Amino acid sequence: MNRDALIRDLRAYGRAHGLEVRWEPRQGKGSHGRLTVGARFTMVPAGQIKRFMLETILRQLGLPKDLIR
């Protein structure tokens, strides 16, 4: 899964669950950006994101692992 697909899926999840999802590409260093879901945030790298990284991102955001396809 790439970063754009992850953000798209999280925005859909946020709409369905009443959570604000913000993507701030200028808040990170290099190719990283800040992803905020509700009151929690994490840094997300560009390009392909492996399954382990996806699970880590979801855990940091307090979201269930079953969001991963």
Image: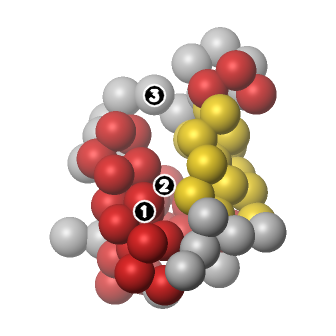
Label 1 Cα crowd, 10 Å radius (few <14 / some 14-19 / many 20+): many
Q: Which residue is mark 1?
A: 10
Given the image, on which type of amino acid does mark 3 rest?
Ala
x, y (%) of residue 28?
73, 26
Which residue type does callout 2 highlight? Met
The circle on residue 53 is 2
Residue under the point 33% across and 61% down: 9
For label 3, the SS is: loop
Image position of 47 (left or right of 58): left
In the image, residue 68 above or below residue 1: below
Among the 4 quarters of the image, the one containing residue 32: top right
Q: Residues within 10 Å of mark 3 (few under 14, many from 20)?
A: few
Q: Amino acid at mark 1?
A: Leu
x and y, in percent, of residue 20 in the image: 61, 64
Q: Which quarter of the figure has residue 59? A: bottom right
In front: label 2 or label 3: 3
Can the viewer see residue 30 in this picture?
A: yes
Q: Residue at x 42, y 60 (%)?
A: 11
Q: Which residue is mark 3?
A: 46
Report the Cα–Cα distance between label 2 and label 3. 12 Å
Q: Position of residue 55 (x, y in %)?
A: 48, 68
Select label 1 or label 2 by which is in front.
Answer: 1
On-image quarter of the C terminus: bottom left
Decide if residue 39 is on the left or right side of residue 14: right
- The local secondary structure at tag 2 comes to helix
Q: Position of residue 57 (x, y in %)?
A: 57, 60
**Residue that appears at 57% across and 18% down:** 31
